[in-house]
């Protein structure tokens, strides 16, 4: 039986749950009961019907609640594949790095269009990196120290999932110079990202090797699940941009996190109000069981 998880940014009360149950019944769907995950913050409603039908019935409540609807089985996922920029960290690294070259406005405008799916991701990435040619490589470390901040909830999400044996993979269309230390700080098992070419202490304006694009992200999800012997239902993917859509669509549970419209529309659930601990509530995990390294 599907489970609809309701998560409030501030508080959720019985009237909210009653309103959700009424909407489900009005849509001709059955409600067999509900339980608190954390009283006043997150609750599960057990409903009969298809996941799309339940999502559609509850959609009007998403103005103030985050709602995740999924099948009841394999709720605690054994594989997490996550984007980095604007998902596990609060910024887009290439935009912040561009600020050290005096090009933030120009480059961030391209980033926004690429994340909305209006530009080819690979071409847009190569074009933005080209503009950084000649920037001192020392700006990377300065940028990481001065600008990169971990997204709220990340330090709970990843250690908690790893605590029950899940494998956590950070897959970024950004750069290893940022992704490696971010992954280490949060606790990811593995990182896959692009590499900025550096010669004589300066960026060359090139990316070395193949680009990590949307197809690579989706393939890494599938390959990782296969390597771990997991059913697709045991996988969770989260991201915010158009280049995350294939992996979000491919995952057992695909989450769009404060995402661009195309990504939000493609996802199994869109988180708009809360931080990354919402993904723990989606897996039925109360705050008392969260781990924070």
Image: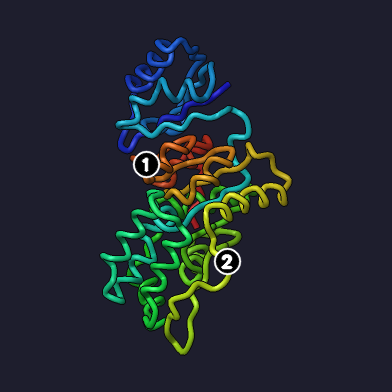
Crowding at mark 1 (Cα within 10 Å: few <14, some 14-19, many 20+): some
Mark number, residue 210 = 2
Going by the image, does 111 lie left or right of 222? left
* Left/right of residue 217 with respect to residue 95 in the rendered view: right
Q: Earlier in the sequence, mark 1 or mark 2?
A: 2
Residue 177 percent location from the top left of the image: 48, 72
Q: Quadrant of the N terminus?
A: top right
Q: Residue at coordinates 49% horizontally, 49% vertically from top-left? A: 244
Query: Which color scheme is applied?
Result: rainbow
Q: Element at badge 1?
A: helix
The image shows residue 143, relative to residue 238, as above or below, that is below
Q: Position of residue 12 (x, y in %)?
A: 34, 29
Check the image and report above or below for 284 versus 174. above
Disc 1 from disc 2: Cα separation: 27 Å
Is 145 or 27 nearer to us in this picture?
Answer: 27
Comparing marks 1 and 2, which lies closer to the viewer? 2
Question: To which residue does mark 1 refer?
Answer: 261
Please give the name of the residue rendered at 57% of the width and 62% of the height, measured from the top-left corner: 192
Q: Position of residue 264 (x, y in %)?
A: 41, 40
Q: Position of residue 99 (x, y in %)?
A: 29, 71
Question: Image height check: is 221 above or below 173?
Answer: above
**Dot 2: element:** loop
- Tag on residue 106? none
């Amino acid at each position: 039986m599907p489970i609809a998880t309701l998560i409030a940014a501030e508080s959720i009360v019985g009237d909210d749950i009653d309103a959700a149950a009424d909407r489900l019944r009005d849509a001709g769907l059955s409600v067999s009961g509900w339980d608190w995950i954390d009283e006043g913050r997150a609750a599960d409603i057990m409903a009969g019907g298809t996941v799309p039908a339940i999502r559609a019935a509850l959609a009007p409540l998403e103005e103030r609640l985050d709602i995740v609807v999924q099948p009841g089985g394999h709720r605690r996922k054994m594989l997490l594949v996550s984007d980095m920029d604007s998902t596990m960290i609060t910024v887009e690294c290439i935009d912040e790095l561009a600020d050290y070259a005096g090009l933030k406005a120009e480059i961030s405008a391209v980033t926004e269009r690429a994340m909305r799916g209006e530009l080819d991701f690979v071409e847009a990435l190569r074009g933005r990196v080209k503009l950084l040619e000649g920037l001192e490589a020392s700006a990377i470390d300065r940028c990481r120290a001065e600008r990169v901040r971990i997204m709220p909830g990340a330090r709970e999400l990843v250690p908690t999932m790893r605590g029950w044996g899940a494998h956590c993979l950070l897959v970024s269309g950004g750069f290893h110079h940022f992704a490696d230390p971010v992954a280490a700080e949060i606790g990811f098992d593995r990182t896959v990202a692009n590499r900025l070419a550096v010669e004589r202490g300066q960026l060359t304006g090139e990316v070395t090797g193949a680009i990590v694009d949307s197809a690579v992200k989706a393939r890494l999800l599938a390959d990782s699940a296969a390597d771990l012997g997991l059913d697709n239902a045991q996988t969770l993917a989260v991201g915010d941009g158009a280049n995350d859509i294939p992996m979000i669509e491919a995952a057992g549970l695909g989450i769009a996190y404060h995402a661009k419209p195309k990504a939000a529309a493609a996802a199994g659930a869109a988180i708009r109000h809360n931080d990354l601990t919402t993904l723990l509530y989606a897996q039925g995990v109360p705050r008392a069981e969260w781990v924070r390294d």
